[in-house]
Image (spheres, rainbow, N blue to C red):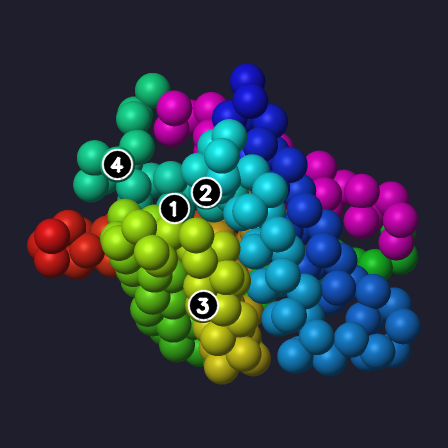
Amino acid sequence: MKHVIAEFLGTFIILFCGTGAMVISQETGGTIDHLGITICFAIAVTVSIYAFQSYSAAHFNPAVSISLWTVGLFPGKKLVPYIGSQFAGAISATLLLHLLFPNNQQLGITLPRGSFVQSFVLECILGILLIVVVLFTSQGKKSTRHLDGILIGATILLAALFAGPISGASMNPARSLAPALVSGTFTAIWIYLTAPIVGMVAGAFIWKKMQ
């Protein structure tokens, strides 16, 4: 249960602070710009990793859990509980934002601003980038492991800064599905449910081949 609760709480924090920054920006006339939103996401991820990694290894992302499982770093028996708790945390955070800001129609949904192909390819590449950093830090030399939260947070900041204006830089199926469910907006949701998984599984096998 500690693993499940940690995954729930970490994902909740990331969604509540990250998509919450998007919602509050809309509610206050853009007081939080793109840079501010990306920083909120990055800090939320970093804080959650350091807070909960001793309990659950701090996945907070179904694509991360699935990719680690494909290369034998995560037991299959934990896959469904982890993914379930991640989606539950994301949906709970979005529902709370909806209660706080009932007039907000988007709730931080992820939408392509270019073509669907552009967003799909970007999300795949961002997935590769993220999981490669995750694996080379968490499974690498002992000297880098204590920096994993900072490096992963920095990777998310980097990805969101340059790709966010086009694809939204989701990199996380739970992050995108929760606002889509609560808002009832499912435009291009298939991109954000599939591309991060495709990218992270590919990145995990890249890492494995280099071992």
Question: For residue 155, which numbered disc appears in the image?
Answer: 3
Foreground mark, 1 or 4, reads 4
In the rendered image, the vertical position of residue 23 relative to residue 211, given as above or below: below
Question: For residue 64, which numbered disc appears in the image?
Answer: 1
Q: Residue at x 65, y 79 (%)?
A: 35
Distance between mark 1 and mark 2 Cα atoms: 6 Å
In the rendered image, the vertical position of residue 140 relative to residue 8, given as above or below: below
In the picture of the structure, the residue carrying the numbered disc 2 is 59
Q: Looking at the picture, which amino acid does disc 1 mark?
A: Val
Q: Residue at x 11, y 58 (%)?
A: 210
- Tag 3 near tag 1, CB within 8 Å: no
Q: Looking at the picture, which amino acid does disc 3 mark?
A: Thr
Q: Nearer the viewer, residue 171 or 144?
A: 144
- Tag 1 near tag 2, CB within 8 Å: yes
Q: Looking at the picture, which amino acid does disc 2 mark?
A: His
Distance between mark 3 and mark 1 Cα atoms: 14 Å
Q: Position of residue 49 (x, y in %)?
A: 53, 47
